[in-house]
Image (cartoon, grey):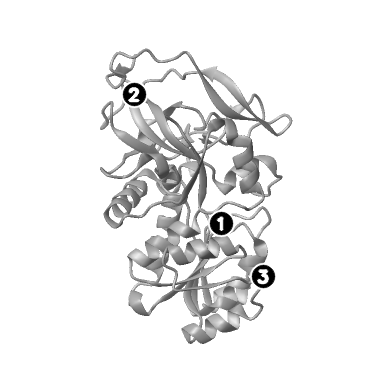
Amino acid sequence: MGIDMATNGTQLPEKQKAAQFNPKDQTVSINEIPIPSIKPHEILVKVKSASLCHSDLMLFEPNEQNLTLGTGAPFTMGHEACGTILQLGSDVQGFEPGDNIGWLPIVDCCYDCDGCQVHNLHCENGTPQVQGMSVDGYFQEYVAIHWRNAAKIPAGMDLSTLAPMFCAGCTAFNSVTDTVAELKGSEPAETWVAVVGCGGLGHLGIQYLKAMGYKVIGIDLSPDALEEAKTQGADHVFNPGTEEDYIAQIKQLTGKGVHAAINYTNSVPAYSSNPSLLRTNGVLMVTGIPQKPLQFSAMDISMNRIRVRGSNNGTTPRLRECLEFSGKYGIKPHLTRYRLEEFGEMLGVMREGRGVGRLGVVFD
C-alpha cells in the first residue's frame, strides 16, 4: 500500500492515454491503459513533461548494438521525463509526496554491484530493462518508477521544459565533465572543444562547456542547429555540408586543432572525420551511438595521437550533480512542445531531422 499525500483527496482516474509502440508491426498509436499500481520500491509520479530522444528511433531501425527493443505487447514510449510525486511505496527512502523529481530509466537491476556502479545496464545480478524501450515508459500522464533512479529537482527549475535533462541533459553533462577530466591542467579560456552535433544533446553540451569557460566550436549539417549553437554561446560554427574546407579552417582558427571533440551524432562519417579535428593527444569523446560499428586507427590510439573515451547518461549520483550544476548556472533545454495526440507528428519531425533542440509533450 503506498503513501498518498499529494492528491489532496482527489480520486485518480482509472485509465489514461499513452503513446505506445507495437513491436509486432513497428507502429505507434495512442491507447487507453490503466493507471499503474506501485510496488513497495516504486514511486507514482504525475508527469509534467516527457521528451523524445534520438535513441527512441532505434525502435524502428535494425541495430548492431545487441539491443532488444521490445518483442511482445505494445508498451509506452519515452525514457525522458519529470514530474511530481503522488504516492510512495513502503520501501521508498528520501522522498516525500509533492517532491518534484526526474529520474533515469533502467529497471530490474540491483543498483549495488560493480556493473551498476558503471551503468545500470551492466548489472551483474538482474536483467536490466529500459523503460520506454521494452517496458512502459513516460509518454503517459502517470508513471511508476524505481525510487533509486530518482533525483530531486532544485527549486526554480521549470518542469514543463525540463524533461530532456533526464537523458540528453545528464548525458551532455557527463560527456563534458568526462572530457574536462581528460583535459586536466588545461586552462579553459585557452582550450578549444568541438561539439559535433548541435541538436538535442549538443545544444546542452555547449551550455555546459561555456558555463565552465571553454572555447566552443559547433559542427552540424543543419543550419537551424547551428543557429541554436550560436544562441547557446558557441564561439564559432561550421557546416561540413557547405564548407568543404571546415577542418582546415578549424586548424587555422585553433592553431593545431581542437583539444577535444565531443560527438553527439549517430553518424559514422562524422566520427570518421573527428580525428582530423584533433591536435596531438586530443580527446575524442564517443557519446552518440551509430547503428554501425566505428573504426579508428590503432596506430593513432596506441601512439597517443588521439585518445578515445566514452560517456553516457550515467548513474543517479551523477544525475544529482548534473541537476545541481544546471540549477546553479541556469542550463535549460530548448523544448518544442506538443500535445500527446500530436505524438505521430512529433515523431515524424525527429525522424526527418527537422527539430531544433528537443521535442516533447507537456501535460496539464
Q: Is 109 or 241 nearer to us in this picture?
A: 241
The residue indicated by pointer 2 is 86
Q: Secondary structure at mark 2?
A: strand
The crowding category of the residue bearing disc 1, from other C-alpha atoms within 10 Å (few below 14, some 14 to 19, many at least 20), is many
Q: Secondary structure at mark 3?
A: loop
Q: Secondary structure at mark 1?
A: loop
N-terminal of the pair, mark 2 or mark 3, is 2
* Cα–Cα span, label 3 and label 1: 19 Å
Q: Are marks 3 and 1 in contact (CB under 8 Å)?
A: no
Q: Nearer the viewer, mark 2 or mark 3?
A: 3
Observer able to see residue 125: no
Quarter of the image for residue 325 reads: bottom left
Image quadrant in which the N terminus is located: top left
Q: Is 306 or 338 nearer to us in this picture?
A: 338
N-terminal of the pair, mark 2 or mark 1, is 2
Say above or below: 102 vs 40: below
The numbered dot on residue 241 is 3
Left or right? Give the position of 38 relative to 238.
left
N-terminal of the pair, mark 3 or mark 1, is 3
The residue indicated by pointer 1 is 288
* Cα–Cα span, label 2 and label 1: 34 Å
Percent from the top left, x then y, of residue 154? 27, 44
